[in-house]
Amino acid sequence: MDIVLTALAVIVAWRLLCLRYQRTHIALLGGHLADLRIERHMEMLTQGYTRAIHEQDEARQLQVLESFAEAERTVADQAHALAEAMGKESSQATGMGALPLCLPYVERFIPTLTRDFRELLRIHAAGLRHVVDNESRWGLKERAYHLSAELYLLQHSCHWFCKSRAVADARLVLRHQVKHQKVLESVSEPTRSAYLRWLRGG
């Protein structure tokens, strides 16, 4: 009985620490997002791309995709602004656990099990700019496909920082019906390469 009570106490303590730790990350990221409109533009674009895909007429489909040009530039600019703002925070404040589950304050005790959210945001900002500027010369539909993946991956990273990798994976499937691996395969090659290096801690 004592073992059960001890285990229960440990689990409760761990959950309370997780909640406190996660609230700190949520407040930090939320404070920087408060002055930006990136979340609204991300939602508008992902919903808009889905609507365009279901257009039966190809000319209308392309017309809808073309209408998002300003929002695409804005989201790329704001991702850059977010990366710049978070870049001013300390490495301890922006550390995030590399393991699937939340390990509160792991960056203080086992730095090798953490990754830097500041670096990850710089990867996302560069990736979004690459796709928005269409450096790979994609057609409108292919470009929208890759940009959607870039946005999904950015959203996944923010959820990971605020909660955990497992929660971010689950939310990606729940909200967009797509797995993290598929999203990673669908972003631009520069984003994928940089992301995998970051993930490995390289």
Image (cartoon, rainbow, N blue to C red):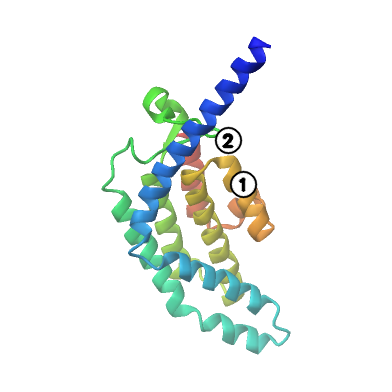
Instruction: Say if 69 sits above or below 119 in the image.
Output: below
Query: Which residue of the protein is positioned furthest toward the top in this rendering?
Result: 2
Q: In this figure, which residue is indicated by the disc labeled 1?
A: 169
Q: Which residue corresponds to the image point at 42% horizontal and 23% vertical from the top-left?
A: 110
Q: Which residue corresponds to the image point at 57% horizontal and 47% vertical from the top-left?
A: 168
Q: Earlier in the sequence, mark 2 or mark 1?
A: 2
Query: Given contact means CB atoms under 8 Å apart, are the residues at marks 2 and 1 in contact?
Result: yes
Residue 2 in the image: state x and y as whole percent.
Answer: 64, 10
Three-letter residue code for mark 2: Pro
Query: Which residue of the protein is positioned furthest toward the left in this rendering?
Result: 88
Instruction: Say if 2 sits above or below 149 in the image.
Output: above
Q: Which residue corresponds to the image point at 69% horizontal and 82% vertical from the top-left?
A: 55
Corner quadrant of residue 60: bottom right
Left or right: residue 19 compared with residue 3: left
Q: In this figure, which residue is indicated by the disc labeled 2?
A: 100
Label 2: few (<14), some (14–19) or many (≥20) C-alpha neighbours in 10 Å: few
**Residue 134 in sight:** no
